[in-house]
Image: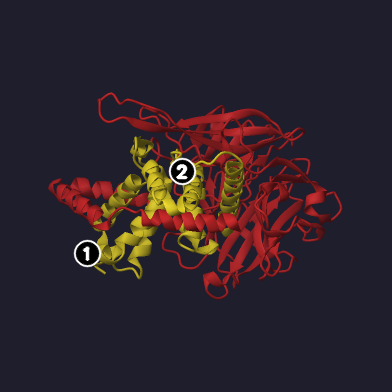
Amino acid sequence: MTFEEFAEERLAAVLAFAMVLTGQRALAEDLVQDVLIRAHARWDRVGSVDRPDLYVRKMVLNEFISWRRRSWRLIPAGSGPELAGAELLSAPDHADRHAEQAAMLAEIAKLPRRQRAVLALRYYEDRTDAEIAELLGCRPSTVRAYASRALSALRVEIEAGRSESPRAGSALSGGI
Amino acid sequence: MRTEQDIRAAFRTLGREAPDAGAVLSDVRDKLAKASTNSRQDVSRKVRRWLAPIAAAAVVIALIATAVAIAGMQSPRHHATPSAALDKLPRYYMTMARPPDAAGIGWPSIVVKNTRTGATLLTARPPAPYRSFAGITGASDDRTFVLAALEPVGAPQDNRDIVKLFRARLDASKRTLTMTPLPIPAFKPPMFLDGILLSPNGTELAVAMQTGKYQKMLEVSVYSLPGMLLGTWHSRGLAQPYWVDPGLMSWTRTGVLAINWYSYGRTNDPRDTRSGLWLLNPASASGNLRTQSQLVVPCCKEVNGFSSASDGVVTGNGAAVLIPMVRSTTVEHVPPNKGPSVEPKYVSGKIQEFSVATGEPTGALWWVHFGRPDSPDAFDPDVMVLWSNTSGSVLVVQANMVGGRLPDGRATIGVLSRNHFTPIPGTSSSAASGIGVVF
């Protein structure tokens, strides 16, 4: 598979995965751009593997977890999660459901990165714990512990949110 | 179950908000065109630097006190002056190693390294028909280990692997490990081995596993090291759980076992399921894990806006448990270059101490603030505690480096002491999973 073929056929899915990981469009763009530039530099090798898209996704995952980019901590006001939240709330017929999704994404954004990565791989990519362990370089039980901790935290926060005033429209303030 | 469904739905919605692929590709092409004007040498150097963390091998670390046993075995090429922090550790540690291009699951070999230099002293593979290791743990006598060897059966997703426990004895003079199968039946599906941990004196072995048709039940067994079953505790009787997951275990020097475990009930109320860090006295009668043990810190307890990031450990004296916690906050900020307003994300981390007696927070052992553009901090605050000394004043943790002394983005293992992190040489390309770290 050539780089151009990959971009044509697989890039949209990789961007969606990055969007789920980061929760912010600008960060997803930066993340995938950096990874693509690195992948392009050695595409002879990347393109020769069975699933170049999986290879690139692993690069995206590593980059996300690595905390390398200091600039990621600089989020332009009014962009990123705030934008995503506003768009999610823009359909009046589904306002309640969208508000709940925005609240859920806000809580996910507060989780540590490895926990968020495990949730994205498990519930967006539908990967098994063994596959996630392979991607993250840890044991399956560690994956389950991360997932358990994340789910427990989300249940606490979401239940607390449901018992309080509606959180629709609140800016998502995570993104560690 | 509703939470998982909500997550799936939210992720699907979020995925549809992804940036346009054409626009991203156009930006990439622009950057590639600019890069081509730079010298080929510069580009090559940058790519090599980026490649390193991607090739990081998964390693599980167990520190072992082999100071006398294999003294003099280190390579004469390594004369690095150890820091004061590393002097507080034993001279050698053990890891499970996995080359980046290794096939199959598990770690193909174990490696003993010099704590101060990272020099490899010994490498061993599992006995046939086992092909890799799934876990290791060591005792403080510097010679005794238990290794979990893995025999893959079927495809990885089939989850049909067989795991057998071996006692390993380090022969220092011959630089070999003698592995002897323990008289504990091999773990076969539907049993799933989750963790093993030797007590510091090497006399007891804790084994955590999931059992049942859908691996819904947690079972913790403690064996004498010759392999005699001393007791078994299970998670039956929880409030309608549909899943129970074990986490990191740790021992006190008085023989109390700390277990992180999580359970989900059919309701979303976590108070029904009581996830958190529990203390089990193996001298108690076998039976129900929940009634025979004490919940010290419930899962996901917040302390001043900090939430727990990973499993906790009990200190050697049994007086406290230590749990990594993180907090992120958004702060208004006007950059000095008068550009658009930005909102830096301040991410802070700490190791929170909780009293075993009261369950209340008693102090923070380590702080790291991350996120300020001018911050000199070079460590991801989202750390995992692997080991604590008796008092909790010296910790071994896994952290992600983000700059400074080691290449960016590498998981490394190091010593936290007096609010200072010192990487242990040879672990920078590792990703630890928190299995037994013992002295």
- Residue that extends furthest to the right in the rendered view of this protein: B285
Q: Position of residue B210 (x, y in %)?
A: 68, 62
**Near-viewer residue (A147 or B35):** A147
Circle 1 chain: A
Q: Residue at x 37, y 48 (%)?
A: A87
Relative to B437, is B10 on the left or the right? Answer: left
- The amino acid type found where label 2 is placed reads Pro
Mark 1 and mark 2: Cα distance apart in space: 51 Å
- The amino acid type found where label 1 is placed reads Glu
Instruction: Work out which quarter of the rendered image holds the C terminus of chain B and state it.
Output: top right
| Chain that is coloured red in the picture | B
Relative to B22, is A167 on the left or the right? Answer: right
Q: Which residue is mark 2?
A: B76
- Residue that extends furthest to the left in the rendered view of this protein: B37
Q: Are marks 1 and 2 in contact (CB under 8 Å)?
A: no
A69 shown above or below A126 = above
Q: Position of residue B145 (x, y in %)?
A: 66, 54
B298 shown above or below B226 = above
Q: Residue B164 is drawn in which quadrant? A: bottom right
Mark seen at residue A27: none
Circle 2 chain: B
- Residue that extends furthest to the front in the rendered view of this protein: A93
| Foreground disc of the pair 1, 2 | 1
- Residue that extends furthest to the top in the rendered view of this protein: B336
Mark seen at residue A4: 1
Instruction: Work out which quarter of the rendered image holds the N terminus of chain B and state it.
Output: bottom right
Say which element carries label 1.
helix
- Asked if one can make out residue B176 in the rendered structure from this viewpoint, the answer is no
Q: Residue B417 is drawn in which quadrant? A: top right
